[in-house]
Image (cartoon, rainbow, N blue to C red):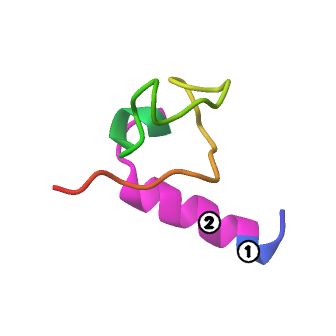
Amino acid sequence: MGLWNRIQAWWTRLRCPTEFLCDNCKYDHPSACSRPQRPNAVRCPDYRPRGK
């Protein structure tokens, strides 16, 4: 795993306290996300944390 991938994985773990990214993603809705990994994605290039 390259340095950039390790940094991305670290950032994702820091921003997403749940096991699956979809549980904490602002696109967690069938009409907003059509990725086949949804709702149990552990990696996703479209992941954005929900605003609080």
Horizontal side of 8 relative to 51 (left or right) equals right
Marks 2/1 in contact by CB < 8 Å: the verdict is yes
Q: Secondary structure at mark 2?
A: helix
Find residue 41 and report its horizontal and vertical position in percent.
58, 32
Instruction: Tell me the tag on residue 14.
Output: none
Instruction: Tell me the tag on residue 4.
Output: 1
Task: Give me the residue at 73% from left, 65% from top.
Answer: 5
Relative to 2, residue 51 above or below:
above
Task: Give me the residue at 67% from left, 24% from top.
Answer: 36
Q: Residues within 10 Å of mark 2 (few under 14, many from 20)?
A: few
Amino acid marked by disc 1: Trp
Horizontal side of 29 relative to 36 (left or right) equals left
Find residue 26 and report its horizontal and vertical position in percent.
35, 46
Q: Which residue is mark 2?
A: 8
Relative to 17, residue 10 above or below:
below
Q: Secondary structure at mark 1?
A: helix
Q: Which residues are magenta?
A: 5-20
